[in-house]
């Protein structure tokens, strides 16, 4: 793999990445955080007997076209050769309602269809185990192949020749063949019938789901694809939404900034809830809020962490996976994320900000009340104690602790929103209590984080450096958009952090040197800030620049190289896709003014 021209397929239980040639190069099976049976994305060069992928080889392949089927998570790859032969590869994970409940097994379906001529293909199924350490053992049955030595055995049930798959012999594709890849269980029905039924029902599910979305008039396709991607990154069983489905795609070449993003960060919570609310995706939003509220309840006797596992696991011990050399050979590949035991004081505000929605949305089946408010007050007290205490900050600096302005603003936000919630619950004394704390913290931040020489707020108390999170001061209502200090901060960030059409997170050295790539969501925050300043034309121009960096399927990773436009970082990045939704909603003309 030498680029991120990848498509995401999934069903909110399992997910996979398919490259431009139709190879499944990343598939954590059976769940988002499981051992990847397809891991060639992170195997680097494999000159001999490559494994960790599932692919289709067309003899003499010369041209490839790839796209999602309209308004769905079904991916179609068309491969043709120089003689006029062509095939279609259709990939998806089943998701539909069956017997009164949602059917979404840990399964991928691959249908290979002849389109033109007499194509000759080879089917290769080569799963790996133990993070690429070795190839899975296989056992051939009459109409299936079982693969073992993994956490959950996998079966490929097919109407193709089993022996042709086992020994990887090419054959003429006379009619469609189907591969049902999932648990080592008997499939009820012929593979072709099951595959066709799953395809039709999954297609209908996604079409129905997209029809329920509230989308802006402009950039509709952008928002729909971002919404589907956000949905695919949600884990139905608990409501968690992962930051990305991958681990250890470097933030920049040879930087060792390789992290496991298959977990749920509280820092994402406010923006994810905001985006889901804008979309009208109430069911997904309520599940996610339940996940956040359960984590808050879990921490009554323990500290609130920055990141949790998809089942609310607290311990995410980090280790290297020596069987994987890394994306383009740029290791290490890490499993787990040590950020779980960092001190990040912004988490109190982020948890309260996300949870606030549960007190105000009448659509929710389980609106929050006084019991949940008491849990949030516990976080508020932590915010009061820690707003001026050094921490690792939003950007998870591993080698130093300082009083980060963004963390302090989030502590203010916790108190501010608690005052608002208390007023909603008609608890006037508590509202007064939290408003007093919010005012105190607000003044302390303005005194310690405003740098008059720079005419800007700065990243740390009494500091002289900037970071892009300060662009959110108006978004979180810490400053009014009309406050000249906000405009001054935006201008200073543009001057110091802009690289071409994108923004760095910060420009000072950290544990790994100076950042080289731009964090895409920071550019999206810049766009939102410009819109709040009334500079809509500039904002729209920058938004189009961001859109131009999406891959051929409309997906974004975490980072972009400002000089080349190349995507870097884990993929597809929830934060980046949520930013597309927010920017489009903020900048689009209204439906009332459209025609």
Image (cartoon, helix red, strand yellow):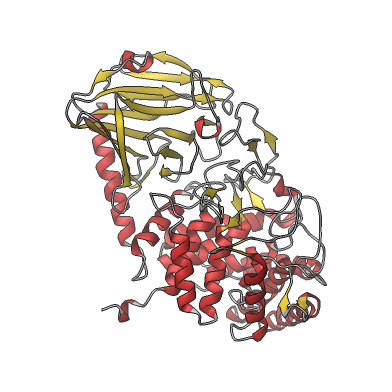
Position in image of residue 36 (x %, y %): 52, 32
Q: Is residue 139 visible?
A: yes
Q: Can residue 368 be seen in this view?
A: no
From the image, which quarter does the C terminus lie in?
Answer: bottom left
- Please give left or right for residue 155 compared with residue 211 in the image: right
Residue at position x 72%, y 75% in the image: 457
User: What is the count of numbered marks?
Assistant: 0
The picture quadrant where one finds residue 104 is: top left
Residue 126 vertical position relative to residue 514 in the rendered view, above or below? above
Residue at position x 61%, y 68% in the image: 353
The picture quadrant where one finds residue 144 is: top left
Position in image of residue 425 (x %, y %): 59, 78
- Please give left or right for residue 557 compared with residue 62 in the image: right
**Most foreground residue, 106 or 377:** 106
- Please give left or right for residue 329 compared with residue 277 in the image: right
In the picture as drawn, the residue positioned furthest to the left comes out as 117
**Most foreground residue, 379 or 471:** 471
Residue 196 vertical position relative to residue 410 in the rendered view, above or below? above
Position in image of residue 211 (x %, y %): 30, 61
Residue at position x 31%, y 81% in the image: 593
Residue 422 vertical position relative to residue 277 in the rendered view, above or below? below
**Most foreground residue, 157 or 186:** 157
- Please give left or right for residue 278 compared with residue 67 in the image: right
Position in image of residue 4 (x %, y %): 48, 44
């Amino acid at each position: 793999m030498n680029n991120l021209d990848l498509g995401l397929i999934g069903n909110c239980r399992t997910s996979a990445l398919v490259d431009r040639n139709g190879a499944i190069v990343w598939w954590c099976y059976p769940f988002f955080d499981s051992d990847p049976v397809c891991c060639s994305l992170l195997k680097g060069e494999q000159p001999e007997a490559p494994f960790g992928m599932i692919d289709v080889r067309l003899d003499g392949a010369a041209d490839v076209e790839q796209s999602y089927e309209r308004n769905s998570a079904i991916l179609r790859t068309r491969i043709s050769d120089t003689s006029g032969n062509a095939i279609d590869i259709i990939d998806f994970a089943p998701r539909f309602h069956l017997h009164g409940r949602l059917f979404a097994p840990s399964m991928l379906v691959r249908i290979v269809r002849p389109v033109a001529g007499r194509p000759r293909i080879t089917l290769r199924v080569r799963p790996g185990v133990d993070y690429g350490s070795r190839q899975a053992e296989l056992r051939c049955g009459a109409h299936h192949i079982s693969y073992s030595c993994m956490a959950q055995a996998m079966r490929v049930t097919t109407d193709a020749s089993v022996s042709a798959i086992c020994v990887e012999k090419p054959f003429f594709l006379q009619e469609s063949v189907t591969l049902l890849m999932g648990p080592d269980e008997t499939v009820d029905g012929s593979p072709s019938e099951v595959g066709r039924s799953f395809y039709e029902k999954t297609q209908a599910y996604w079409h129905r789901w997209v029809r329920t979305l509230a989308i802006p008039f402009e950039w509709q396709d952008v928002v729909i694809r971002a919404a589907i991607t956000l949905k695919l990154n949600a884990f139905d069983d608990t409501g968690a939404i992962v930051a990305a489905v991958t681990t250890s795609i470097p933030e920049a070449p040879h930087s060792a900034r390789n992290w496991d993003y298959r977990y749920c960060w509280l820092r994402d919570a406010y923006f994810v809830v905001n985006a889901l609310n804008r979309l009208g995706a109430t069911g997904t939003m309520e599940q996610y809020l339940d996940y956040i509220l359960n984590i808050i309840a879990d921490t009554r006797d323990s500290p609130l962490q920055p990141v949790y596992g998809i089942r609310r696991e607290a311990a995410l011990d980090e280790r290297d996976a020596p069987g994987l050399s890394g994306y383009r050979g740029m290791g290490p590949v890490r499993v787990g994320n040590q950020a779980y035991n960092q001190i990040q004081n912004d988490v109190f505000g982020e948890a309260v900000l996300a949870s606030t929605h549960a007190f105000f949305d009448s659509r929710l089946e389980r609106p929050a009340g006084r019991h949940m408010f008491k849990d949030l007050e516990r976080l508020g007290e932590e915010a009061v104690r820690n707003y001026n205490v050094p921490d690792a900050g939003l950007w998870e600096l591993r080698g130093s602790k300082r009083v980060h302005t963004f963390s302090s603003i989030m502590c203010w936000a916790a108190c501010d929103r608690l005052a608002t919630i208390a007023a909603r619950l008609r608890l006037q004394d508590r509202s007064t209590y939290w408003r007093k704390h919010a005012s105190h913290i607000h003044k302390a931040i303005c005194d310690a984080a405003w740098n008059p020489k720079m005419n800007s707020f700065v990243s740390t108390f009494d500091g002289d450096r900037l970071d892009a999170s300060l662009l959110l001061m108006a978004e979180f209502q810490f400053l009014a958009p009309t406050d000249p200090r906000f405009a001054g901060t935006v201008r200073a960030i543009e001057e110091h952090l802009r690289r071409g059409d994108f923004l760095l997170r910060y420009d000072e050295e950290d544990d790994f040197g100076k950042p080289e790539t731009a964090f895409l969501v920071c550019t999206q925050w810049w766009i939102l800030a410009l819109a709040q300043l009334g500079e809509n034309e500039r904002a729209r121009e920058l938004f189009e620049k961001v859109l131009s960096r999406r891959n051929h399927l409309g997906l974004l990773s975490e980072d972009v190289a400002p000089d080349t436009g190349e995507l870097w970082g884990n993929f597809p990045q929830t934060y980046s896709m949520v930013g597309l939704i927010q920017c489009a909603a903020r900048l689009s003309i209204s439906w009332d003014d459209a025609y």
